[in-house]
Amino acid sequence: MKTIDLRSDTVTKPSKAMLQAMFEAQVGDDVFGDDPTINALEEKVAQLFGKEAALFCSSGTQTNQIAIKVHTQPGDELICDRTAHIYNYEGGGIAFNSGVQARYVFGDKGRFTADEVLQNINDDNVHFPRTSLVCIENTVNKGGGSIWSWAQMQAIRTVCDEKKLPLHLDGARLFNALVETKISTQQIGNLFDSVSICLSKGLGCPVGSLLIGDKNFIYKARRIRKVLGGGMRQAGFLAAAGIFALDNHIERLKDDHRRTKQLQSLLQPLSFVEEMIPAETNLLIFKLKKEFSTQKFIQHFAEKNIIIVSAGLQTIRFALHLDIDDNDLQRVGEALKSFA
Ligand SMILES: *Cc1c(COP(=O)(O)O)cnc(C)c1O
């Protein structure tokens, strides 16, 4: 029986076609700038977003952390949401790598307002940390895959322009947001000073993220990547997977979203569900009522060869992805109905 893994959208394995593209990649030493496939991926992504340059990195943590390092100085403060990945899940990297502290705001499922940003920008005064960066996340991981609207993002940009602050986008799941809205990659490139995208999430690559920005920003980012030990050599095999994914795996994200909504409908009437964050993309976060054990719930699924994990107190997260099809969804539905 196939193992169904709903722990994360990072668990996907490369398809035959993706492996074939990787197998055929031309490679070279990328620290010398010699890897034609990495160069092609960086150019492709820069063009896609209408930006000057891009940098291929090992992970979304690395692209975010490099961006923070380039945009800030030690002792500075950045503004992000309380739920932000950069704040919660990057090992304290904001402090560790950049000597910066996070000033967090309390948005709605990770989406905060321009006013909240304004209220948290420090005046120029020796007592206060210098506010030097604003970071948003789209879709919001801890927000259950919530999407920022264009108006919400644009309002933040306006404040950043007024206050001369750079704006970074953690777009680990950006394409999940874009396929559900009419917002284009060009518009995103235009709105943000720097953008991080992940190939290893919904796009189904084994490894890789890109940091996108203007030439000067990426020049500095390339130096920081090297300092962090992130200079890779014949990594064009990985970049080939990225090119394949960008060409083939974006539109199909809608299938993941459709399946997530189907799961949501299945869960809605079930007696053990306390509450659920309305599904917007490929993540479904819900709470079990107090009298139900999360451990037993996870065990019940494990017995059916379905792997799930807890995402906090009484909380479960299902992540849909490219290796889950309609048959798998049916099995998950049956497991849900037979619990309790
Ligand atoms: C997964 C993720 C990242 C990056 O994670 P890596 O595992 O380091 O690639 C960054 N931001 C968000 C919102 C994420 O979900």
Image (spheres, rainbow, N blue to C red):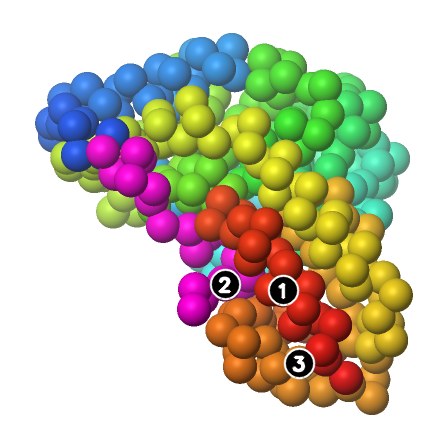
Main secondary structure along the magenta-highlighted residues = loop
Query: Which secondary structure lies at badge 2?
Result: strand
Q: Is residue 337 visible?
A: yes
Q: Nearer the viewer, residue 303 or 206?
A: 303
Amino acid beneath label 3: Phe
Report how far apart the C-alphas of labels 2 and 3 lie in the structure.
15 Å
Q: Position of residue 97 (x, y in %)?
A: 43, 51
Q: Residues within 10 Å of mark 2 (few under 14, many from 20)?
A: many
Amino acid beneath label 1: Val
Return the mark for residue 297: 3
Q: Residues within 10 Å of mark 1 (few under 14, many from 20)?
A: some
Q: Which residues are magenta?
A: 1-20
Label count reads 3
Q: Position of residue 270 (x, y in %)?
A: 84, 70
Q: Residue at x 69, y 42 (%)?
A: 258
Quadrant of residue 179 within the rendered picture:
top right
Q: Image height check: is 158 above or below 255?
A: above
Q: Nearer the viewer, residue 281 or 51?
A: 281
Name the front one of labels 3 and 1.
Answer: 1
Residue wearing tag 1: 332
Q: Is residue 287 left or right of residue 79?
A: right
Q: Nearer the viewer, residue 326 or 340?
A: 326
Quadrant of residue 215 within the rendered picture:
top left
Residue wearing tag 2: 4
